[in-house]
Image (tube, rainbow, N blue to C red):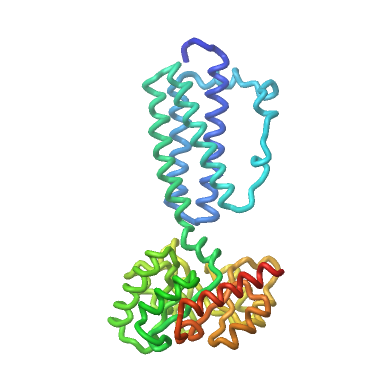
Amino acid sequence: MEQYRGGRSIYRAIDANANRCREGLRVAEDYARFVLDDAGLVTQLKELRHEVTDTVKLLGDESLLVEARDTEGDVGTRISVPQETKRATEEDVLKSALKRSEEALRVLEEFGKMVRPDIALRFEVIRYRLYTIEQDMLTRRLPERKIEAAKLCMIVSEEGVKGALEGVVQAAVDGGVDMVVYREDGASSRRFLEKAHALRALCASKGVPFIVKGRTDISVVVDADGVHLSEDDIPVDAARKVLGRNRIIGLNAASMDDLRAAMTSGIQYLFVNSKLSKQTPTGFVLPLFVVAENEEAVAKVVKSGAKRIAVGRAIGEASDPATAAGNIKALLCQEEGGK
């Protein structure tokens, strides 16, 4: 690395930001490894991290950077803001790490122009690649986050509604339903597929997660957000092989053993009865939807303090599905607000 305007201060800036960038990429790499369990993303981030190291070396002798380092005398090490000490979720950790790396790459690009402009442009290319990886990583859990935010789930089938299926679901979603599970126990596969396609399009237009009951194959074909499995359906690990890592799997739970098993099964939510919803093990974080089929059950479940509820005929067979959904949603919100 030749001597240039700014001298040692430029070495320090390049050294600090090279380290900052690699550290952030390593955090993101471990998120991809331990949270997303995605070998492809791990490989991309690892390669990007090594590419940063190799590009820095092209700027000159690495020993000059180390010699210029002055951690104790760096005023920046003693400046912090409250946000730097707070990470509420795993995703907060990822976002912080990615932004740190992206900002460091921009600094490397700008200071690198003072040494070798041709090499500095490589940091710009790396930064744009990281933007793409960031988008991929942060959209992986979009359906899952929608499930976590959902309060009112509608379990719907053609035999469980009064009127046209699509019209009833449309009204229910407009009224406050924020998750739909579609089931058709007696329908032919062709009929199931046709209706699933239509409901998927409807739910997607409203930003509402659409889940297919039991039929993992149909869930994939219509690009549903996931599948809901019961004890008679294929096992979770088999469903995951079909669905891939980015779709949702929900289960029915009937016992404490089911709840314990669910904690390590890789699913995203559970349907439970009211009693079981109050018996969650320590550390249990999966969303629980308490199932209530009719209006009387809905009232009891909501009064018992359920935070999420899965409703069937109480909405599907209502004379006004939008109003029925809105009333239930209002009860849930009211009950939550009163606690």
Residue located at (54% from left, 12% from top): 7
Query: Can residue 216 be seen here?
Result: yes
235 in relation to 120, above or below: below
| Residue 238 makes an appearance in the image | no
Q: Residue at x 52, y 69 (%)?
A: 267
Q: Is residue 20 left or right of residue 243?
A: right
User: Percent x, y for residue 312?
Assistant: 49, 83
**Residue 100 x %, y %:** 54, 37
Q: Nearer the viewer, residue 297 or 270?
A: 297
Q: How many marks?
A: 0
Please give the name of the residue rendered at 60% of the width and 69% of the height, measured from the top-left corner: 263
Residue 25 horizontal/vertical position (percent): 51, 40
Residue 210, quarter of the rendered image: bottom left
Above-or-below relation of 43 to 306: above
What residue sits 52% from the left and 22% below the top? 62
Could you say where residue 17 lies in the image, as x and y percent from the top left?
54, 29
In the foreground, 135 or 45: 135
- Quadrant of the frame with the C terminus: bottom right
Occupied quadrant, residue 338? bottom right
Relative horizontal placement of residue 338, taking residue 190 as reference (left or right):
right
